[in-house]
Image: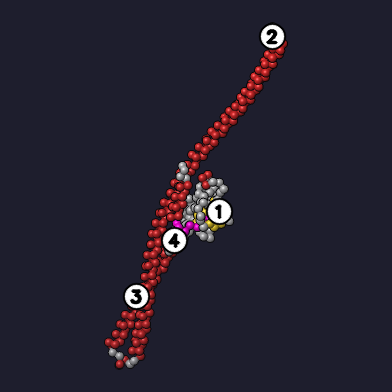
Amino acid sequence: MSGLTYQELVDEVNFQRDRLYRRDRSLDRLETENDNLRRGNDDLRKQSSDFSDRLDKETAWRREWQRDYHSKKLDHEQTEQYLCDEEARNQELEDQVQHERKARRELEHELARAKEDNRRWESESRRLQQKIRTLEQQSESSITEEAYKDAIDGWQEAFDRGNEAHEKLRVTERELKRLRATTRDNDQERVPDLLEVPPLALRIRKLEPTEPLQCEVIRGLSTEPAYGRPLNAPNFSPALAASNTPTQSVVLIGHDMRTTPREIEDTGTGWETYRNRRGRRALRNEGDRFRRQYNGF
């Protein structure tokens, strides 16, 4: 270097200084990139941890939902089978009621005939008594023993037949009274109390023999999605369902049905009442829709 001129030395120093400056700039840039990569790596680790926690929660919720779904599905099938059995029993009771009503009509006709026979024999008895009094008022010389005996025998026969018709009338009235009481009891027994059914806790009101099956379905409303809320309403109690409401209606707690158009009646208690006049068929259709709604699992 002793052979270099002053200008060459100055150029060499400037070159080395620029080289160090560029190296320092490159090191700063690398450190900045390293810090950015480190922060990005920390963010990725946090996202991975959050995703793992969410995955665990979703898995736990899915297992719980599946258990709840299978439980409610079994309850629904049990309730549907119970309704089938009760419908068959109601049909048997209705047939029995119709048979007893037919027998009661026949007895009423027979009662009317017995009353008519009773009136006829009473009239005949009065006529024969009048004839006997007329014969007794006549002179004994003009009455033959045969005519008096015929009149007495005729009156006795009319009296016996009148007593027989009167006794038959009393028996018919007692049988008719018994059939009326039996028919009334069967009318009350046609639709039993279904409140003790464990799956969906329902109660069907009394029906007339010619009235179709009717029920009311009461469901609680919620802002939660349908797949996330339990199928049983939390504030339902058998005592509330057993209270004597004006309609003596069925109480059926089930899943959210707000997505299906129904005839809705506001009860003013935070619930909605759906009058279902299609009976078991509607319940089966709702069960099919329920299964389609949860077909994803």
Observer-nearest of 110 and 7: 7
> Measuring 34% from the left and 84% from the top, which residue is drawn there?
128
The outermost residue toward the top is 2
Q: Amino acid at mark 2?
A: Leu
Q: Which residue is mark 1?
A: 271
Q: Which residue is mark 2?
A: 4
Q: Is residue 151 visible?
A: yes
Classify mark 4: residues with Cα within 10 Å, few (<14), some (14-19) or many (20+): few
Front label number (1 vs 2): 2
Asked which secondary structure carries label 2, the reply is loop
Q: Amino acid at mark 4?
A: Pro
Asked which secondary structure carries label 4, the reply is loop
**Residue stretch in magenta:** 269-280
| Disc 1 and disc 4 in contact, CB within 8 angstroms | no
> Measuring 42% from the left and 62% from the top, which residue is drawn there?
186
Q: Label 1, label 2: how many angstroms apart (C-alpha)? A: 102 Å
User: What percent of the width, then of the height, locates residue 47?
Assistant: 57, 32
Q: Label 2, label 3: how many angstroms apart (C-alpha)? A: 163 Å
Q: Which residue is mark 4?
A: 212
Q: Which residue is mark 3?
A: 164
